[in-house]
Image: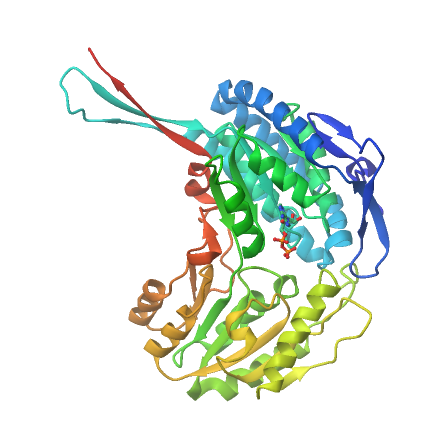
Amino acid sequence: MKLNDPQLLKQACYVAGNWVTAIDDACSSVTNPSTGELIATVPALGKQETSSAIHAADKAQGDWAARTAKERATVLRRWYELIVENTEDLATILTSEQGKPLAEAKGEITYAASFVEWYAEEAKRAYGELIPSHKPDARILVSKQPIGVVGAITPWNFPAAMITRKCGPAFAAGCAVVLKPAPDTPLTALALAELAGRAGIPAGLFSVITGDAVAIGGALTESPTVKKISFTGSTGVGKLLMSQSADTVKKLALELGGNAPFIVCDDADLDKAIDGVMIAKFRNAGQTCICANRIYVHNSIYDEFAAKLVDRVKALKVADGFEPGANLGPLINAAAVEKVQAHVDDAQAKGAKLAYGEPQPEGTHFFPPQVLTEMDDTMRIATEETFGPVAALFRFSDDADVIRRANHTSSGLAAYAYTQSLSRAFKFSEALEYGMVGINEGLISTEAAPFGGVKESGLGREGARQGMEDFLETKYTLMGGL
Ligand code: ADP
């Protein structure tokens, strides 16, 4: 891996302001999903190191919270600038361990940096309020205080952005973070920690620990010092962390799985809807929790839409992320390939047609994009998140019916609808039981908006003013005897 600054490639963990390895030198490998090559090793740490990090976080947090908001903002701003200055290197690390095309990796670094920039600004706006009192000689004072030490656990699909989306608001609010990144993509997290240290994030305020997920997750959830768990990942692990957090009654932010419906009405601008599907379905090779999983197309335009989509999908280049012009990199691992293939096989066995798709090259993690037509609600894709580049087209003919089918899932993260009718747009926006709805838009993620889901897709919001609220406690003081 060629980096302008080789110091950004860390094979040690950042704990309490020091770069450490395991006492017994135990480590785990990080491989390139595109080639299978070993890129680096990272320490296999566990409960003991996590406890040290929590202790250091607790010590550092009070002083950090006592600084003025402007001081915290200045450090965050510096972190933002360093991330931007090192975009090239961070993207190289990200593509090497995650596989997404380099241009997309650079886009993710820009997106990741945007959270740090946004919350550097928001740090100054943790406003409280003075409420008209119920007594003449008293005043009701409401202030905001940082929640304290936060345990963060992040996934591999956005190795940079999922970290800054949590750490940006946490540090802005005056919290400390102990982070466990995904085992497939720890190198981006460690590089971000190096830059955080250079920016002036105090020792101990931010630790990054790689290793045994169960041990680290257990130490974070059982510690009474950790006041909040912020997790992005699978619904199953989210539920587990929720139950583990019950004993100490922690606040939870959970961003879990989705199964996004993408509805194309008969009055939609077809070309715009195709553009929307391309981004909502094939970004990151379909490995995002807001990916269009079920594409419902009105009967009257179904065949035209399918033909146009196939034309666009044919032009996608599947290649190593470092190859110029690559649109889709590999899937993250063999298990991901197996799951996506199983969804395609299940659909075909139940009568779906493969309108376009090349066979999956065995022995690799590459999955060529596919378009399936004549999908029905008995197929696995109708109820399970595919997390791969398979566009599955369902038919519909009635708005009320498609809304009912779109809502018939335990997930409620993102939904999309394309229509040129204002009243229909509002109808979909209001009736879809999702935390986020894109109307005539396939790309909804931005640091300026609250990202999050309802139902089993999770709790809490990340991004926007709401994202910072989640790291603050509300304190009420009755100032009496005035
Ligand atoms: P995926 O299946 O997409 O990898 P996971 O939910 O398994 O999603 O992983 C998301 C994050 O949760 C990763 O950092 C992973 O290591 C972590 N994780 C997995 N199992 C546990 C666990 N039992 N306790 C804490 N963290 C876990």
- Residue 4 lies, in percent from the top left, at 81, 41
Q: Is residue 325 visible?
A: no
- Residue located 56% across and 56% down the image: 236
Quarter of image, res 102: bottom right
Residue at the extreme front: 247
> At 49% across and 58% down in the image, what residue appears?
444
Compared across the picture, whether 108 is left or right of 243 comes to right
Placement of the C terminus among the 4 image quadrants:
top left
**Vertical relation: 300 (above or below) 176:** below
Question: How many discs mark residues in the rendered view?
Answer: 0
Instruction: Tell me where residue 82 appears, x and y as whole percent.
Output: 67, 35
Nearest the camera: 122 or 471? 471
Is residue 437 or residue 374 the one in the foreground?
374
Picture layout, residue 233 above or below residue 202: below
- Vertical relation: 145 (above or below) 322: above
Of all residues, the one furthest to the top in this rendering is 481
Q: Is residue 322 visible?
A: yes
Say whether residue 368 is left or right of residue 282: right
- Residue 392: x and y in percent read 56, 77
Judge whether 403 appears above or below 216 on screen. Answer: below
Check the image and tell me how it is coloured: rainbow
* Residue in view at x 51 percent, y 66 percent: 259
Q: Is residue 196 left or right of residue 259?
A: right
Residue 436, horizontal then vertical, whole percent: 43, 58
